[in-house]
Amino acid sequence: MIKLKDIISEKRFIEPEDAGREINASLDGLEKALKKVRNPEKWAEKYHRSLPDLLDIMYRVQKVLGKMR
């Protein structure tokens, strides 16, 4: 399993012809992860100190995805 800190710290080059496949694979993974979310309120209570950063990341992802229309 790929950890978020590895993704963030790892800067890698993606060939332009592979970029579309990489985006689609990442979106598929995100879709699967979202389907598994069951109780975000409980998580927020337990990890309340991490919540502001998580919300910032989610906002940034939404902003980028909005530009892909």
Image (cartoon, helix red, strand yellow):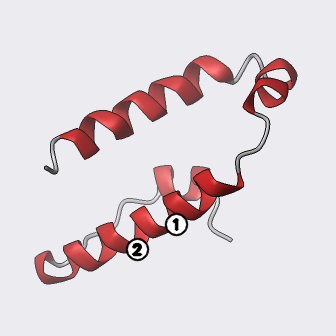
Instruction: Specify the quadrant that holds the N terminus.
Output: bottom right
Amino acid marked by disc 1: Gly
Q: Is residue 6 left or right of residue 23?
A: right
> Tag 2: residue type?
Ala
Mark 2 and 1 residues: CB-CB less than 8 Å, in contact?
Answer: yes
Q: Taking 27 as reference, is 41 above or below it?
A: above
Identify the residue at image location x=53%, y=24%. 55
The disc placed on residue 66 is none
The residues tagged by marks 2 and 1 sit, at their Cα atoms, a distance apart of 6 Å
- On screen, 61 above or below 56? below
Q: Residue furthest bottom?
A: 17
Q: Which residue is mark 2?
A: 25
Residue behind mark 1: 29
Residue 68 left/right relative to 4: left
10 or 38, which is in the foreground?
A: 38
Please provide percent x and percent y for residue 61: 37, 40
Answer with left or right where residue 59 lies relative to residue 33: left
Residue 48 x/y as whole percent: 76, 17
Residue 49 found in image quarter: top right
In the depicted structure, whether residue 22 falls above or below residue 51? below
Q: Label 1 crowding class (10 Å Cα cut-off): few <14, some 14-19, many 20+?
A: few
Which residue is pictured at 49% across the width and 52% down the height? 9
* Residue 39 position within the rendered picture, expressed as x and y whole percent measured from the top left: 79, 36
Q: Label 2: how many residues lie within 10 Å, few (<14), some (14-19) or many (20+)?
A: few
Residue 8 pos. (x, y %): 48, 50
- The kind of secondary structure element at disc 1 is helix
Residue sitting at x 33%, y 71%: 24
**Across the whole image, how many numbered discs are drawn on residues?**
2
SS class, disc 2:
helix
